[in-house]
Image (tube, grey):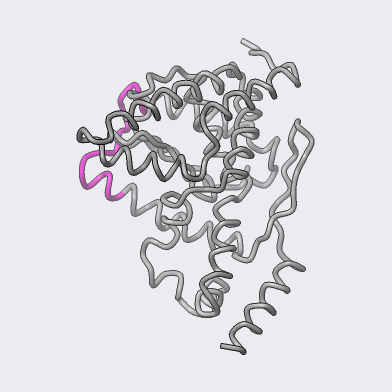
């Protein structure tokens, strides 16, 4: 045990000296240091593998939506956001971006490391999203990938989990692949921190603005989320256990939707962001 702690300390020390996230260039002018122990190549490769499993499962159950109006809107909005993403992080232009829509009542969307995006039709239906609001959500999820929040979260988990997992994530063994859901859990299922969520809100706002969407969509969708959260909370005992469980996971780590839309409005006002359309 004593030697394990020494090994972990040594590895973490080397990581702090040699590994860091890509710098993002925001119109808001600020960036921060991030603790990165897991390599970018490792998490991107594993994310692509897990993403393929998600898409294959959706195909198997006839849930992959490639032709509906929802899917067309998701593709159109996402492509506009992807086009401007390199203005925040130049190297993402080399990512193998993928965008898919899954026919499911889940009120959610996510973007795995390396630009692997999924939007569930339930999100668009339940919140009755217009394109500006959809852009705010997809932009937010893309920002998680641009800022490597999953890699950051996994790096912290590695330190907590001990030497075996550290060795696996450094490619010493196949430890990371021994758990089929390891990457999926870290990049999709597990919640981000409040600071990461606020950061993704901010960069998502910038992405949608640069892509030509009305930045007020970021405010209005958070107001809709606020109403949705209260609705699910009120009906959690009436057959809405799945939604309530997901909501509890979100609200335990996310800033409140009210705080988020107020913070977004403050940014819009401070920087004079207005729709270019």
Please say whether residue 174 is visible from this viewpoint: yes
Whether 31 is drawn above or below 239: the answer is below
Quarter occupied by residue 200: top right
Whether 7 is drawn above or below 42: the answer is below
Residue at x-position 42% and y-position 37%:
109
Q: Residue furthest top?
A: 277
Q: Name the quadrant of the C terminus.
A: top right
Residue 233 % position (x, y): 34, 32
As drawn, is 193 to the left or to the right of 180? right
Q: Name the quadrant of the N terminus.
A: bottom right
User: Is 65 within the magenta?
Assistant: yes
Observer-nearest of 6 and 277: 6
Residue at x-position 56% and y-position 23%:
218
How many numbered marks does the figure carry? Answer: 0
Look at the image and give the residue range highlighted in magenta.
56-71
Observer-nearest of 187 and 117: 187
Please say whether residue 121 is visible from this viewpoint: no
Residue 202 % position (x, y): 64, 33
Residue 104 % position (x, y): 28, 35
Whether 60 is drawn above or below 226: the answer is below
Whether 62 is drawn above or below 47: the answer is above
Residue 15 % position (x, y): 70, 69
Residue at x-position 68% and y-position 20%:
268
Residue at x-position 24% and y-position 36%:
237
As drawn, is 17 to the left or to the right of 68? right
As drawn, is 192 to the left or to the right of 130? right
Q: Residue furthest right?
A: 29
């Amino acid at each position: 045990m004593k030697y394990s702690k020494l090994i972990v300390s040594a590895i973490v020390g080397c990581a702090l000296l040699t590994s860091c996230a890509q710098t993002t260039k925001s119109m808001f002018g600020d960036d921060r240091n991030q603790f990165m122990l897991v390599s970018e190549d490792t998490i991107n490769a594993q994310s692509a593998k897990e993403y393929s499993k998600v898409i294959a499962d959706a195909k198997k159950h006839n849930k992959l939506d490639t032709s509906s109006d929802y899917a067309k809107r998701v593709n159109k909005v996402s492509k506009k956001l992807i086009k401007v993403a390199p203005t925040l992080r130049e190297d993402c232009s080399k990512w193998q971006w993928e965008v898919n829509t899954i026919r499911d009542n889940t009120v959610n969307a996510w973007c795995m490391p390396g630009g692997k995006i999924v939007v569930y039709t339930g999100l668009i239906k339940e919140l009755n999203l217009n394109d500006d609001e959809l852009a705010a959500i997809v932009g937010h999820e893309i920002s998680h990938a641009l800022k490597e929040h999953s890699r950051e979260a996994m790096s912290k988990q590695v330190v907590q989990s001990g030497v075996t997992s550290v060795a696996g994530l450094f490619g010493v063994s196949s430890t990371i692949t021994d758990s089929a859901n390891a990457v999926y859990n870290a990049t999709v299922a597990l919640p981000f921190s409040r600071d990461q969520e606020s950061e993704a809100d901010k960069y998502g706002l910038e992405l949608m603005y640069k892509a030509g969407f009305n930045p007020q969509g970021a405010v209005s969708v958070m107001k809709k989320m606020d109403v949705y959260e209260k609705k699910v909370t009120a009906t959690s005992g009436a057959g809405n256990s799945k939604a309530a469980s997901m909501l509890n996971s979100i609200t335990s780590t996310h800033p409140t939707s009210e705080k988020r839309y107020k913070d977004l409005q403050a940014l819009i006002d401070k920087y004079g962001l207005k729709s270019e359309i």
